[in-house]
Image (cartoon, helix red, strand yellow):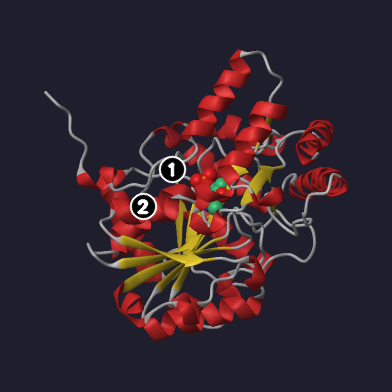
Amino acid sequence: MAVELADRLKKLPPYLFAQLDEAKDRQLAKGVDVIDLGVGDPDLPTPKPIIDRMKEAVENPEHHRYPSYEGMLSFRGAVARWYKSRFGVELDPATEVITLIGSKEGIGHVPLAFVNPGEVVLVPDPGYPVYGGATILAGGEPYNVPLVAGRGFLPDFSAIHGDVLAKARLMFLNYPNNPTAAVAPLDFFKEAVEFAREHGIILCHDAAYSEMYYGEPPHSLLEVEGAKEVAVEFHSLSKTFNMTGWRIGMAVGNAAVVQGLKKVKTNIDSGAFQAVQEAGIEALVGEHGVEEMRQVYKERRDVLVEGLKSAGFQVEAPQATFYVWFPVPGGSDSITFATRALEEVGVVITPGVGFGAHGEGYVRAALTVSKERLEEAAQRLARLMV
Ligand SMILES: *Cc1c(COP(=O)(O)O)cnc(C)c1O
């Protein structure tokens, strides 16, 4: 029998990193000491008090049974209290907060709840590939909204055509941004809320990097007056507490959107392991390790940015996230440059075009190795400048 993929899978964009993955495997097989700045996954361990709480929670038989779809009220309450203290935003834990199995789970499911076949989802380009992928899996059509340096990597709402807007149901935004590291001012969020209200579009703001900052703390979109009428915010403990493997996040905001997500979850998964939610409460209440995390990435950022600058790269220090996003030198395309970095000097960086057509001309380096390795990476990349 020939196993045929469903059309929706065939519609997913090609995986642009395949060529680079193969090249990396070849270098490793040759015994090259590869420095991998490719993946956005923290290298540091989860803070100890969170692990200890997990150990205790895992012994509790109550947590061995199915969790509720929307998550424990105690976890949702901890989320609401954290939003109040961090952003000054009031949330009703009963109706405006839902536990997710990592924020990717909610981002992946939200188009299933609100997008009909043929309807449009506005997605940032460059952007986290899940926004477009989830849209296609739901039968919707992603419409790429360019993020360009000249506008601080913020979308230009006025450039989106009326016929697109008429079919648009959702818009994804993500600040602090992956991959550009841009931060959005509160005025931009006000503009976004107005735009969404005017065109009847649900705003889905991905705030996974809100705690990974080196200057002023970034805003929540929900700080905008009336934002809850049109918006949900996706949040994650993954980056803030080095918990990518634990799979715990949340969506907060508009109660009808939260309800729609719950309906999808009811039919697809059975919620997040309660012991992990207990550990999540510990993380949010104790804010364990967050200040130290920022300090570590700030030092790493400075090492890499200074190293690249003195080699002649045009690069600015990011004010948030653990990514350094910089133009490819000498006008080559991003895949060619990333391939050279790997094959000539053994450094993995991500070609910007993998995040969308408007990422072309840039590469992304993740600060997920030690200062010493970043210094070495900068020295190696400098050899590509001569
Ligand atoms: C890492 C990341 C997430 C977090 O995903 P989880 O599923 O919560 O681990 C979400 N959005 C973006 C843009 C990310 O880079």
Would you say the beta carbon of the disc 1 residue lies within 8 angstroms of ligand 1? Answer: no
- Give the x, y percent position of residue 244: 57, 39
Instruction: Identify the residue shown where x is 42% and y is 48%.
Output: 105
Of 176 and 136, which appears nearest the observer? 136
Q: Is residue 218 left or right of residue 308?
A: left
Provide the secondary structure element on which disc 1 rests.
loop
Q: Label 2, on which residue?
A: 134
Q: Label 1, on which residue?
A: 272
Of 164 and 197, which appears nearest the observer? 164
| Kind of residue sitting beneath label 2 | Ala
Of 333 and 300, which appears nearest the observer? 333
Q: In the displayed image of the protein, which residue is found farthest to the left?
A: 1
Instruction: Identify the residue shown where x is 63% and y is 73%.
Output: 151
- Is residue 134 among what the camera can see? yes
Determine the CA span between mark 1 and mark 2: 20 Å
Q: Is residue 3 left or right of residue 103?
A: left
Location of the N terminus by quadrant is top left
Instruction: Identify the residue shown where x is 69% and y is 18%.
Output: 32
Disc 1 packing (10 Å; few <14; some 14–19; many ≥20): many
- Give the x, y percent position of residue 45: 69, 33
Location of the C terminus by quadrant is top right
- Give the x, y percent position of residue 281: 59, 48
Mark 1 vs mark 2: which is more N-terminal? 2
Query: In the rendering, which numbered label is found on residue 252?
Result: none
Q: Nearer the viewer, mark 1 or mark 2?
A: 2
Provide the secondary structure element on which disc 2 rests.
helix
- Is residue 346 among what the camera can see? no
Disc 2 packing (10 Å; few <14; some 14–19; many ≥20): many
| Kind of residue sitting beneath label 1 | Ala
